[in-house]
Image: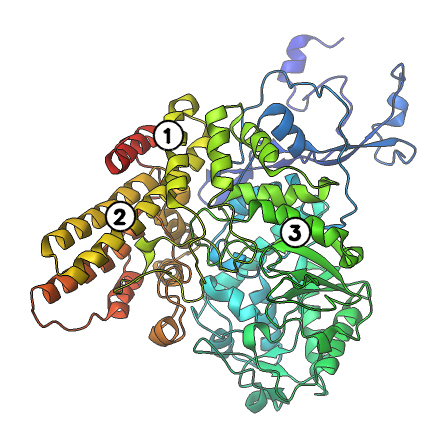
Amino acid sequence: MLPLLSLLEDPTMVGMYKLPPRSTAWPTRQLEVAPGQLLFDLDDCRLNLNGFWKFRWTPTLPEDGDGFAAAEFDDSGWDDIAVPLNWYLKYHVGIHLSWNGMQAELPEVLPAVKQKERHETDMKYRYDFNYCTFSYTMAFWDWTRWEKEIDWMALHGINLPLAMVGTDGVWYNVLSKLGYTKEEINDFVAGPGFQAWWLMNNLEGWGGPNPDSWYKQQIALQKRIVKRMREYGIEPVFPGYSGMVPHNAKEKLGLNVSDPGLWNGYRRPAFLQPTDPRFEEIASLYYKEMNKLYGKADYYSMDPFHEGGSVAGVDLDAAGKAIMQAMKKNNPKAVWVAQAWQANPRPQMIGNLEAGDLIVLDLFAESRPQWGDPASTWYRKDGFGQHDWIYCMLLNYGGNVGLHGKLKHVIDEFYKAKESPFGKTLKGVGMTMEGSENNPVMFELLTELPWCPQRFDKDQWLREYTVARYGKSNPTVQDAWILLSNSIYNCPDANTQQGTHESVFCARPTEHPYQVSSWSEMKDYYDPNDVIRAAAMMVSVADEFKGNNNFEYDLVDIVRQAIAEKGRLTEKVVEAAFAAGDKKLYKDASDRFLRLILLQDELLATRPEFKVGTWIARARSLGGTPEEKELYEWNARVQITTWGNRLAADEGGLRDYAHREWNGILKDFYYMRWKTWFDYQTRLLDGRKTAAIDFYAIEERWTKATNVYSSEPEGDCISTVKRIFVEIFGK
């Protein structure tokens, strides 16, 4: 035996009688030990416990460990046991790891599973993300936030996510080799807040030009993202080559291209004809540069002619075959992943492709399925033919804030599809939201569907969900959620509205405001008083859940929705008062409406998830110079307000598409619009002549501002909620 003192003084001695670990742990954060010098914090490491553990039962431990510690040890004869960590944490420990909280305290003694429980699926794929998600939610994420997201994905069984970060770096290299200058490349590549629509062939350049540091930063970030995904057994889906080239490719390179036209006022990139002899050359160059940066993928996403792009003069069959051949030349076992949205993918483009080479994402399957449901407004008689497909839930548009969903219908429609003749090609489920970090109940439901062999009762699932989410059972909370599930989370099957029932606070004022965004297709499908009642129930038990992160997030979100309902009812009184010429009632009602906006702003300040300061801080944090910070902040501000220039905002209909009911923007942007409108109408009631309001000019000023918004929570959540709720609802 060595003297104890010697052991303590030996810096190389870190343990005794320990076998080396046979699993990999990753440090989760870095420490700055000197300016610009970072070291991993080895005291804070993370291990992925989801998946399959190898084990062998033995009555005694062999003296030498049976060679277990050796790197070349053969465990092929050992047994496997699936470890569904997330399911165990939710339904046996009462810990729900969610976007609003990816950390939790484990009990000192983990509870035993009282009876045998098994969950298995024949669904091969669990897909994640829409192109839009990368702009509406993830445009300014750093590695710390991405790391949490990948953990969330692993916990929820996601194995096929879109991975488009850093694709702009691929295009930069491709176009450089084709003879484009840096300035020409930046005229083509969109800015950070708008890259989703550039990669979907909708626009060029808007939001740029990007600094050189942006490309370097995103390339480095994507390498870390892809590395971690692959370590977890997650297969990334890279954007593939679909024929997109800059609009001037004919003049610059002499290419044979077609013009897909305009998208909401923006010029689309050109489409390289598959018959052009350089199609294969440019596609090969694209994949070569992608491989150099991120390696080959087994799945590539391609969506030519997205959202109304003209196909005039294009041989669609030849285009589909050329796109497929280019992908297969790069990786013979690769699979094309296509989004079913509106008319895409065109049947003529995919009809002659081999089964197994294409997976179709039925992007809006909860409302407008294309898999073959005859009740759908986007009915495809033959579904997707011989091709595999994935049942997807879009749910959120534009990253808008609001309770929304078809809770029961999502369950029923999944099993309807599974049990139909089209079920034989159904290979999974997918989350294809335009914006994330909202309505966690709906995404938890969707990710559980593949693991449930039979239809199940919505109410029973909700009761179990509330226990999992809040860590304990509470009848009042359960009743509140069931009430919500039968009202605002019970959007009718045939309703095709694009996302949440939008808050009137965020609407550009008119005489009769209703929907906020141009294409929302909103319909009144629930009783607002049901939402207010559910909010009152949550408030009544709030003290019992003080400090419970999940409960406090949901409480703020549900009360926010209740205040928005009150706002819509109050605005109707404003309308009636103006129509009647009742100046006093108009003043009282409009003042009450403005007060509601300020109270909503104060409520949302208690949670960082509902603060515009969080969004802007993330954007600015990616900049290395004042100029970069200002560019990224401008991208962040424009995207959630005007979306584009005057033409795109007003004539193109894009303004307020990505509106956010958030602290900070409520007080400084939406309040400002409504106060301007009420002052305008007051002058009309007084019989004074007044010029029409140029709302775009007012809105643009906010997009160019750089005033600071806090990203830190303000005020105590529970006490603030209770005080505001009593002021508004009197109980």
Q: Nearer the viewer, residue 287 or 121?
A: 121
Q: Disc number at residue 413? A: 3
Q: Earlier in the sequence, mark 3 or mark 2?
A: 3
The quadrant of the picture occupied by the C terminus is top left
User: For the point 71% across and 54% down, which residue is it?
Assistant: 417
- Identify the residue at image location x=68%, y=43%: 449
| Amino acid type, callout 2 | Ile
Query: Secondary structure under badge 2?
Result: helix
Farthest residue to the front: give it.
580
Q: Do the CB atoms of the residues marked 3 and 1 lie less than 8 Å apart? A: no
Residue 107 in which image quadrant: top right
- Residue 654 pos. (x, y %): 41, 68
Q: Is residue 491 left or right of residue 704?
A: right
The quarter holding residue 237 reads: bottom right
Q: Quadrant of the N terminus?
A: top right
Can residue 96 be seen by looking at this rendering? Answer: no
Disc 1 from disc 2: Cα separation: 20 Å
| Element at label 3 | helix
Amino acid type, mark 1? Val
Query: Residue 41: image x %, image y %?
Result: 56, 33
